[in-house]
Image (cartoon, rainbow, N blue to C red):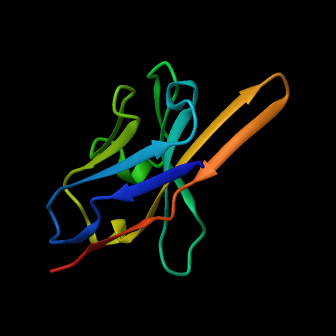
Amino acid sequence: QVQLVESGGGLVQPGGSLRLSCAASGFTFSNYAMSWYRQAPGKERELVERITSAGGVTNYADSVKGRFTISRDNAKNTVYLQMNSLKPEDTAVYYCYANRHNWGAEWAYWGQGTQVTVSS
């Protein structure tokens, strides 16, 4: 059974930090690219950062550049999102996403999300 379980969200003051974790099970984690998305109230889901199976990182959200960092630990089947200098506009539900393409087929899985609220 495939599972992606996010943790580490919560309430934090502006300027603070959080580290989100996403623990994967039920599939070969090291073969998958991993991404963090977020969805703020009333807005579309947004791709934040992505890390390939080989560890290559791409930032997709200019608003978090220099503040957020994605990383992975294949030995622990876990992907992380370190979030620093948090702003109220970072408030959103953060989702973990795993995907893999091979020979024209795609496998993709979503986590259930974890709430991040940045407020004083």
Q: Is residue 26 left or right of residue 7?
A: right
Direction front: furthest residue: 1
The picture places residue 18, in percent across and down from the top left corner, at 21, 56
The picture places residue 103, in percent across and down from the top left corner, at 83, 22
- In which image quadrant can residue 80 be found? top left
The number of discs equals: 0
Q: Residue at x 40, y 46 (%)?
A: 23
Direction top: furthest residue: 54
**Is residue 63 among the parts visible in the rendering?**
yes
Q: Residue at x 50, y 25 (%)?
A: 30
Q: Is residue 53 left or right of residue 94?
A: right
Q: Residue at x 23, y 61 (%)?
A: 86
Q: Nearer the viewer, residue 64 or 71?
A: 71
The picture places residue 51, in percent across and down from the top left corner, at 47, 32
- In which image quadrant can residue 107 be found? top right
Q: Is residue 107 left or right of residue 88?
A: right
Q: Nearer the viewer, residue 108 or 66?
A: 108
Q: Residue at x 17, y 68 (%)?
A: 14
The picture places residue 77, in percent across and down from the top left corner, at 41, 35
Quadrant, the C terminus:
bottom left
Q: Is residue 98 above or below residue 41?
A: above
- In which image quadrant can residue 117 be found? bottom left
Q: Is residue 103 above or below residue 89?
A: above
**Is residue 60 among the parts visible in the rendering?**
no
